[in-house]
């Protein structure tokens, strides 16, 4: 069993149609490869996360027949591991403290990439962030989005630890994937550009490089990504509605058409979905329906 995939929601709201699409696709791709499918709760941004949302997400996954392997990981249980990593990176000269504010960056015209001011002029004020010193990066081939060369302007030194004391997503996700043994990631294409940063950190740490498939996004009526921020509705949990939502997700993913006869039982539907699943059929653009 070489394939290990994962679904990593943030408990800032309930599971909705957009996140169901990612959960279902990542689950089916893992199981099609006879692999493991893990669930990780990315709850580092505590001011925005709620236990009630975590509970609702996990209950919805189970109701929709998406049963995870192994124990659910929570990032808030791993703060010490993240702290050890960024302190080690500082000690090795691969990261440095940064006291610059957004105003500082704008005044120096240091956008879109950080100008390494605090690498040349060590920060002497608190609080500080921690930035990763990017020295290695490489392009990659995405299973759905094709060749992704290194950006011509580079990646830029990015934040590992925020000034407000919260571990940054880039650090946590790279360490989590490594320590969980994740090999393949299926997720939304809003994270496609972030992959270059994560690979830069993987390369520096000599972590195995992962395989990626970035799904097209489900868009709201106004053209924005369907998300909690655009007030996406929680998924229904009535049995008939669950089947309707699963069918809608499979249609959006290009696996079946609207006229396809489907099982009326959730477990049977998931087995049906697995039988027909082919990630190469996923369309370049997902139409809202």
Image (cartoon, helix red, strand yellow):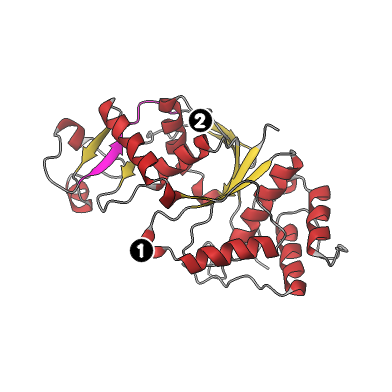
Left or right for 259, reference 102: right
* Left or right relative to 149: residue 131: left
- Which label number is shown at residue 110? none
Residue for badge 1: 47
Viewer-nearest residue: 254 or 270: 270
Q: Does dot 2 land on a helix, a strand or a loop?
A: loop
Residue 153 image-quadrant placement:
top left
**Would you say residue 134 sits in the magenta stretch?**
yes
Q: Is residue 9 above or below residue 152?
A: below
In this rendering, the answer to whether 204 lies above or below 193 is above
Spatial CA distance of label 1 from label 2 is: 35 Å
* Secondary element at image label 1: helix
Look at the picture and state if 88 lies above or below 267: above
- Residue named by callout 2: 139
Q: Quadrant of residue 94?
A: top left
Q: Nearer the viewer, mark 1 or mark 2?
A: 1
- Whole-percent x and y of residue 40? 53, 50
**In the rendered structure, which segment of residues is drawn in magenta?**
128-137
């Amino acid at each position: 069993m070489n394939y290990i995939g994962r679904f990593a929601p943030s408990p800032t709201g309930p599971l909705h149609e957009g996140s169901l699409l990612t959960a279902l696709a990542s689950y089916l791709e893992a199981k099609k490869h006879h692999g493991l499918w893990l669930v990780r709760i990315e709850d580092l941004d505590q001011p925005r996360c709620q236990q009630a949302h975590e509970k609702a997400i996990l209950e919805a996954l189970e109701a929709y027949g998406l049963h995870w392997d192994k124990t659910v990981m929570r990032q808030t249980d791993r703060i010490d591991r993240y702290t050890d990593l960024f302190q080690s990176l500082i000690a090795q000269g691969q990261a440095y403290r940064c006291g610059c504010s957004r105003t500082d960056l704008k005044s120096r015209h240091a956008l879109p990439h950080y100008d390494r001011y605090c690498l040349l002029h060590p920060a002497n004020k608190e609080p500080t962030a921690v930035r990763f010193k990017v020295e290695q990066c490489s392009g990659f081939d995405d299973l759905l989005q094709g060749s992704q060369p290194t950006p011509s302007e580079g990646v830029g030194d990015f934040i590992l630890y925020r000034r407000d004391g919260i571990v940054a997503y880039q650090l946590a996700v790279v360490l989590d994937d490594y320590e969980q043994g994740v090999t393949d990631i299926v997720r939304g294409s809003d994270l496609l550009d972030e992959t270059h940063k994560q690979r830069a950190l993987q390369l520096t740490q000599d972590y195995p490089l992962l395989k990626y498939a970035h799904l097209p996004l489900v868009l709201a009526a106004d053209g924005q990504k369907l998300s909690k921020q655009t007030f996406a509705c929680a998924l229904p949990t009535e049995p008939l509605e669950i089947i309707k939502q699963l069918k809608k997700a499979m249609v959006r993913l290009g696996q079946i058409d609207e006229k396809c006869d489907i099982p009326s039982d959730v477990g049977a539907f998931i087995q049906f979905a697995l039988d027909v699943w082919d990630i190469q059929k996923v369309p370049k653009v997902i139409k809202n329906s």
